[in-house]
Image (spheres, helix red, strand yellow):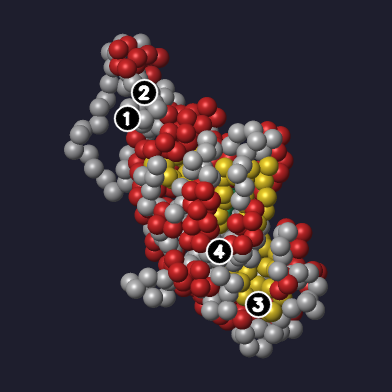
Amino acid sequence: MSEIKSTHLIHHPYQAPKEFESPQAPLFKASTVIFPNVKAMKDRRWQNKSAYTYGLHGTPSTFTLEEKLATLEGGRYCTLMPSGLSALAHVNLAFLISGDHVLVPDNAYSPNISLLKHVMSNYDITFTRYDPMSIADFKAKLSKRTRLVWLEAAGSVTMEFPDVLGLCEATQAHNAVYAQEDRRPSLIALDNTWGAGLAFDAFKTGVDMTVHALTKYPSGGGDVLMGSVVCKDQGIAQELCNAHMFLGTGVGPHDVDAILKGLQSMVLRYEAQDKAARILAQALMQEDAVAEVLHPALPHARGHAHWRAVCVTPQRPEGLAAGIFSVVFKPEYSVAQVEAFCDRLKLFKIGYSWGGPMSLVLPYDITSMREFAAEHLRNRQVVRFCIGLEDTQDLLDDLRQSLKALGSARKL
Ligand SMILES: *Cc1c(COP(=O)(O)O)cnc(C)c1O
């Protein structure tokens, strides 16, 4: 090794002893990957992820995370993206070509709809919103040109749980009708952020791909953005992998490290937040100011039977659900009153996202967001609560003090 300091500081002859072991996997960082010789550089292929070539093509750290997520969601292949939204975008960009049509549920994560409306439309790709609670509406909108079907369970903010099995069956029947023709089949992509790979087994319902905003439960900290796409089919995986390389949407090593750490406690956090959310949702149902609580595990909820069909098992008769729900205020409460209710909360902070340690609250103007806003939502104030890891009684007390000022805390 050179005696010159500048050279010595760059090259690193020290090798960590092989027997070193610690609870956390080592973190591998690279844009440049070093090859032992020119032949190795020429021989290695990034396409099948069997070797390391360049940071963007993967490191042992990204491959470790991909493997864990594929296993978590019951798939085989995984691709990582810098955010949940970029993972949704990735599916649109990887599979759609000019002339294609997309079906998206009316209660989808709304930036996905914005992407279809404002960006994909520039490439002659059209989309239709469907009523997620009506198989008939869905079937009527499937067309010969439909290349991609989006599902979300439960739907964003209003939490309706669709008939995932029925929607997949309808898509497969549709594909079978056109199987003889030279037509690319409709692919089914599920936004699986709510279920997180824990509440139900998405690939058993018939979907082709799952998208997961790792920003939520896998991170668990409210401090990292990342997304993934998981699939089972090798051909689909290859298209996702190719598009990933062409678009260059790699993820940073420290973020990968944070998600790997978050995953270790995710099952415990998911279960604890589910339990706390159900206690709070049930307490809020008793409130005078509240017209309805939107949570798929509540017996009156829209899609409760569909939730039961996939999220309740003999081993888990109480089922699993994300720690998130919304409240519809009675029509006599004004926008200003409901916004003041949110402002008065002390533990619930006003902020986007969920699955983190801190409870969050956000008011929504549902009427402006939906094409199919059902009667119970029209012109009502809807507030979404994301339950963190604080003490449940403290959260209840916080809701109570703010509802009291609204003039309705009597029963909490
Ligand atoms: C948050 C979220 C996303 C987007 O994730 P980001 O990492 O914030 O881009 C996508 N889908 C659902 C259902 C989400 O809740």
Seen in the picture, residue 148 relative to 289 is either above or below; the reply is above
Percent x, y of residue 252:
48, 36
Q: Look at discs 4 and 3 and give the one toward the viewer.
A: 4
Per the rendering, the mark at residue 292 is 3
Label 4 neighbourhood size at 10 Å, few (<14), some (14-19), many (20+)? Answer: many
Label 2 neighbourhood size at 10 Å, few (<14), some (14-19), many (20+)? Answer: some
Per the rendering, the mark at residue 187 is none
> Which residue is found at the position 41% from the left and 53% from the top?
203
Look at the numbered disc 2 and give the secondary structure of its residue: loop
Per the rendering, the mark at residue 162 is 4
Per the rendering, the mark at residue 50 is 1
The alpha-carbon separation of the residues under discs 1 and 2 comes to: 7 Å
- Of residues 7 and 223, the one nearer the viewer is 223
Mark 4: which amino acid? Pro
The alpha-carbon separation of the residues under discs 4 and 3 comes to: 19 Å
Look at the numbered disc 4 and give the secondary structure of its residue: loop
Is there any visible trace of residue 315 in the rendered image? yes
| 61 displayed left or right of 407 | left
